[in-house]
Image: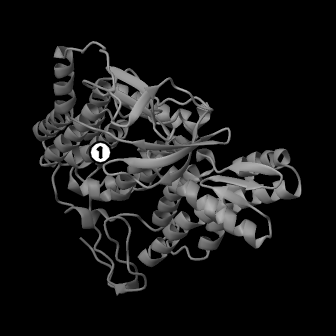
């Protein structure tokens, strides 16, 4: 072993490339690492890939559903880029990772079992988001379980970044719609445009506008957060700069979307609503947010503090170079434990479903409360909640002595299975936005144990209160 006697100014690396710039430290001794083949990498990678393929085959329905969401939803189109980005980040670290000896961390199987139980909760509740989260967690936890903690620490950021594969974020749409509408209204008043808003609906003298779900900016916000996280890790070392860049990546798209909504309405004020909508679709889809992203990069560029040739990890800090490769028997035990832990809950659920008995659809009626009388359904614009394949449902209208009418919808699900779920995509008081019809307009005071909001269709407003009851 040899050591250069010269003292140089270098940087102390942590597990994922963090350092303190400019601190003089002696250079590390030259350390001899074994070749990748003798470190057990070929065998470890084949077993790891085999376990992932086996779990993917067992959970193929949820894997296909998640990928379909990526492909069909413009909100999650960026998720299609996450896997190749993960591969690229691991490839950046390959030189140091090859120096490590993959050694299964068997306690990780308990964490994978927990992720499997999370999948079971999502399956029983019929919530795809929970199942998708479990899929990604199984992938993440398989790395320390089968390849070891040293390897997992070496790819820590890529593993965390994998969470962006989970198709979630649409829950923010109502909040972002409201923020965008209020922001646009303030700018309209500043610009001297007479405007009135009712929730997310904005009216000016020559047209009416809706800050719809597609205009909430959620799809760009989600993509921008993922982009900001990537840039923060690849281009920055200082945590202060990382936090500042991520803060800008969150705030800038929200503010930019407010200006876009205001700009569309203001152009309509100066021209016509038809012309403004055409400009909005072109600018919003191809130019506006590309400019916003370029602006964020341009501002952050001068503050990038990670050198181009700066390594992201230091194998010598992650693992003793003398650590031997795990014997084949231990690698096989790790693979079997990882698969058993990930497959236990789905296998048990499949067994229970195969023995389940589906209840037949039955009749359901709702009695009129005291002081109310049931009458035939009548409405300016027809409305009925959307729930797929309930065990029973009913829809009735009741009127009190003053003539106030209330429509009541009740759906009962005796049990849940695929296609027969109380919570699911496209279900609830209104259809998805892209199917037209009634649209969410604003939140309303929540009754005890329920949720209140307002919906609108063709200028007709309807107040809705919604309740869920589980096991009584």
In this rendering, position of residue 34 left or right of residue 327: right
**Picture coordinates of residue 278 (x, y %)?**
80, 45
**Residue in front for this viewpoint, 201 or 314:** 201
The number of numbered discs placed on residues in the rendered structure image is: 1
Query: What crowding class fits label 1: few (fewer than 14 Cα within 10 Å), some (14-19), or many (20 or more)?
Result: many
**Picture coordinates of residue 311 (x, y %)?**
42, 65
Q: Please say whether residue 291 is visible from this viewpoint.
A: no
| Above or below: residue 357 compared with residue 293 | above
Quadrant holding the C terminus:
top left
* Residue lying at 74% horizontally and 66% vertically, measured from the top left: 188
Q: Residue furthest top?
A: 360
Q: Please say whether residue 248 is visible from this viewpoint.
A: yes
Rendering quarter of residue 28:
bottom left
**Residue in front for this viewpoint, 311 or 425:** 425
Q: Residue furthest front?
A: 401
* Residue lying at 55% horizontally and 56% vertically, measured from the top left: 176
In this rendering, position of residue 370 left or right of residue 321: right
**Picture coordinates of residue 413 (x, y %)?**
29, 26
User: Which color scheme does this rendered protein use?
Assistant: one colour
| Above or below: residue 74 compared with residue 318 | above
* Residue lying at 24% horizontally and 15% vertically, measured from the top left: 359
**Residue in front for this viewpoint, 23 or 99:** 23
In this rendering, position of residue 334 left or right of residue 464: left
**Picture coordinates of residue 329 (x, y %)?**
10, 37
**Residue in front for this viewpoint, 410 or 356:** 410
Quadrant holding the N terminus:
bottom left
In this rendering, position of residue 308 left or right of residue 17: right
User: Of helix, strand and loop, which one carries label 1?
Assistant: helix
Residue wearing tag 1 = 137
């Amino acid at each position: 072993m040899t050591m250069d006697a010269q003292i140089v100014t270098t940087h102390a690396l942590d597990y994922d490339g963090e350092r303190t710039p400019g601190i003089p430290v002696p250079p590390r001794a030259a350390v001899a690492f074994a070749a990748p083949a003798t470190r057990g990498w070929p065998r470890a990678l084949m077993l790891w890939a085999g376990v992932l393929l086996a779990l993917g085959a067992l959970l193929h329905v949820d894997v296909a559903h998640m990928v379909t969401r990526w492909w069909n939803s413009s909100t999650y189109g960026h998720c299609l880029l996450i896997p190749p980005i993960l591969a690229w980040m691991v490839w950046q670290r390959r030189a140091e990772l090859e120096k490590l000896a993959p050694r299964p961390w068997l306690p990780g199987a308990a964490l994978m079992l927990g992720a499997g139980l999370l999948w079971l909760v999502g399956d029983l509740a019929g919530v795809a988001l929970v199942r998708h989260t479990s899929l990604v967690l199984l992938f993440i936890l398989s790395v320390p379980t089968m390849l070891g903690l040293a390897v997992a620490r070496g790819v820590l950021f890529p593993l965390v970044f994998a969470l962006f594969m989970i198709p979630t974020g649409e829950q923010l749409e109502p909040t972002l719609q409201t923020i965008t509408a209020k922001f646009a209204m303030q700018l309209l008043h500043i610009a001297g445009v007479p405007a009135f808003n009712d929730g997310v609906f904005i009216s000016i003298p020559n047209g009416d506008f809706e800050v719809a779900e597609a205009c909430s900016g959620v799809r760009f916000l989600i993509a921008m957060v993922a982009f900001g996280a990537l840039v923060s890790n690849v281009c920055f070392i200082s945590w202060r700069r990382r936090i500042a860049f991520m803060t800008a990546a969150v705030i800038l798209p929200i503010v930019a979307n407010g200006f876009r909504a205001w700009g569309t309405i203001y152009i309509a004020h100066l021209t016509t609503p038809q012309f403004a909508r055409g400009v909005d679709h072109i600018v919003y889809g191809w130019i506006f947010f590309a400019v916003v992203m370029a602006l964020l990069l341009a501002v952050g560029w001068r503050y990038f503090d990670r050198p181009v040739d700066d390594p992201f990890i230091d194998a010598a800090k992650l693992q003793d170079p003398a650590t031997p490769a795990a014997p084949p028997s231990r690698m096989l035990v790790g693979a079997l434990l990882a698969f058993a832990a990930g497959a236990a809950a789905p296998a048990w659920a499949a067994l229970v479903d195969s023995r389940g008995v589906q209840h037949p659809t039955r009749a359901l009626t709702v009695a009129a409360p005291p002081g109310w009388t049931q009458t035939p359904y009548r409405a300016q614009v027809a409305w009925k909640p959307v729930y797929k394949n309930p065990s029973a449902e009913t829809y009735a209208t009741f009127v009190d002595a003053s003539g106030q009418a209330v429509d009541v919808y009740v759906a009962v699900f005796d049990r849940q299975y695929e296609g027969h779920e109380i919570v699911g995509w496209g279900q609830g008081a209104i259809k998805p936005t892209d199917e037209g019809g009634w649209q969410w307009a604003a939140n309303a005071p929540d009754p005890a144990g329920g949720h209140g909001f307002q919906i609108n269709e063709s200028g007709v407003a309807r107040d809705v209160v919604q309740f869920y009851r589980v096991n009584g």
